[in-house]
């Protein structure tokens, strides 16, 4: 068996150790004679798996007790609608920061259910840096402030938590949750689709402060109502049981690695190696401001754009997979989430040096 180097932006790499454990348990989970996938979500066995998964996630992120952790479906994209529906009135103002593709999509949905104002945009810097703290100003009272902490397509990342007074901050952390230490208490809510830095697609995690629950607009569908999910421990209807279980295995794996502080050090080292290879000569380039460069998604180009398709072809032949940039921007992108081993980054860096020698 060969596991190739997977730099996919999402669905993305999952630790081999986790996949092997799931494989070993697949047909007969815990001597029950059936797969975890085939059990009732209301069985005491599955409830124990679900609770352990939440417990471990709470431990990894140090989630305070006045926050609910929800295990939802519908992807981060559903959250774009759920957030205004649950946290604002239709006639109430909301504030958004625009930094790239994902925050823009959140804005399109947010406008449908609230009086949305884009209070700052990275467009002013051609998406090379996030808006400065000093630019963040509100014209009126708002229900919340929304931003994307890491723009998965552009590789643009906040190096601070944007806060204005005590306005609840809502962060789309789909591509950088669990990659570095955060202080959950600075947020009203954090959410993430699982398929980037948690586990398989099909699960969406939301961590929400309790006092924000119970204010949903009347039109909110039942399955879009955070309070319903919170009151039912995310089991109001059938949750994505297998994705929840597998994400739990990833949380255990992360704890074995030493938790978020330890993986953050590895992530920073991996990213530094890659950016160093990009910056070393003029052959490759990434034009994001140094302090806003993502340590999860690293987009880059080759000075001679004609070489990019050759690069991608040869990289794939060298077992370095899924390096093609998002279709909206082209070029290359290496997503180096928690589950992408440092050796994979080392292999990519040595391929980049070699390619440069041959084509520079
Ligand atoms: C991938 C992504 C999304 C969309 O996630 P889905 O689960 O496909 O809806 C939203 N925000 C960010 C930052 C992402 O990276």
Image (tube, rainbow, N blue to C red):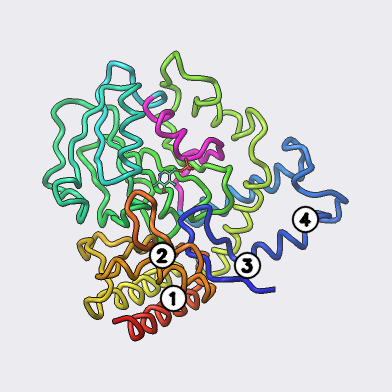
Secondary structure beneath label 1:
helix
Q: Examine the image and state in which quarter residue 17 appears.
A: bottom right
The circle on residue 80 is none
Mark 3 Cβ inside 8 Å of ligand 1 = no
Question: In the rendered structure, which disc, 1 or 3, sits on the residue that comes first in sequence?
Answer: 3
Residue displayed at 38% across by 51% down: 327
Between 118 and 236, the one nearer to me in the picture: 118
Q: CA distance from mark 3 to mark 4?
A: 15 Å
Q: Residues within 10 Å of mark 2 (few under 14, many from 20)?
A: many
Q: How far apart are labels 2 and 4 at the CA level?
A: 31 Å
Q: Bounds of the magenta span?
A: 62-84
Residue that carries the numbered disc 4 in the rendered image: 26
Mark 2: C-beta under 8 Å from nearest atom of ligand 1: no
Q: From the image, tell me which residue sits under label 3.
A: 16
Contact (CB < 8 A) between labels 1 and 2? yes
Instruction: Tell me residue 90's x, y (percent).
Output: 32, 17
- Looking at the picture, does residue 155 appear above or below residue 350? above
Check residue 83 for magenta coloring.
Answer: yes
Which labelled disc corresponds to residue 348?
A: 1
Q: Earlier in the sequence, mark 3 or mark 4?
A: 3
**Quadrant that contains the C terminus:** bottom left
The mark lying in front, picked from 3 and 2, is 2
Dot 1 or dot 2, earlier in sequence: 2
Q: CA distance from mark 1 to mark 2?
A: 9 Å
């Amino acid at each position: 068996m060969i596991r190739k180097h997977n730099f996919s932006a999402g669905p993305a790499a999952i630790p081999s150790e986790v996949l092997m454990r799931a494989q070993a348990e697949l047909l007969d989970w815990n001597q029950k004679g059936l797969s975890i996938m085939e059990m009732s979500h209301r069985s005491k066995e599955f409830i124990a798996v679900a609770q352990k998964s939440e417990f471990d996630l709470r431990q990894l992120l140090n989630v305070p007790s006045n926050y609910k952790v929800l295990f939802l479906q519908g992807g981060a994209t559903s959250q774009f609608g759920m957030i205004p529906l649950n946290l604002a009135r239709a006639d109430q103002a909301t504030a958004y920061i625009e930094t790239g593709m994902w925050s823009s999509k959140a804005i399109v949905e947010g406008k449908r259910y609230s009086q949305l104002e884009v209070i700052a945009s990275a467009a002013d810097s051609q998406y090379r840096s996030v808006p400065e703290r000093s630019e963040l100003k509100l014209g009126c009272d708002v229900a919340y402030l929304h931003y994307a902490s890491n723009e998965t397509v552009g590789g643009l990342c906040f190096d601070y938590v944007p806060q204005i007074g005590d306005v609840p901050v809502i962060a789309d952390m789909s591509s950088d949750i669990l990659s570095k230490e955060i202080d959950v208490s600075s947020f009203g809510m954090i959410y993430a689709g699982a398929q980037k830095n948690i586990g398989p697609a099909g699960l969406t995690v939301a961590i929400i402060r309790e006092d924000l629950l119970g204010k949903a607009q009347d039109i909110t569908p039942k399955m879009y109502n955070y309070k319903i999910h919170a009151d039912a421990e995310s089991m109001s209807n059938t949750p994505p049981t297998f994705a929840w279980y597998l994400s739990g295995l990833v949380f255990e794996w992360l704890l074995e690695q030493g938790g978020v502080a330890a993986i953050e050090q590895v992530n920073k080292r991996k990213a530094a190696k890659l950016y160093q290879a990009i910056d070393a000569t003029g052959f490759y380039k990434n034009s994001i401001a140094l302090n806003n460069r993502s340590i999860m998604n690293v987009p880059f180009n080759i000075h001679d754009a004609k070489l990019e398709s050759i690069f991608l072809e040869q990289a794939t032949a060298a077992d370095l997979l899924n390096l093609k940039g998002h279709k909206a921007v082209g070029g290359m992108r290496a997503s180096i989430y928690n589950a992408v081993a440092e050796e994979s980054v080392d292999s990519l860096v040595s391929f980049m040096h070699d390619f440069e020698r041959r084509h520079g």
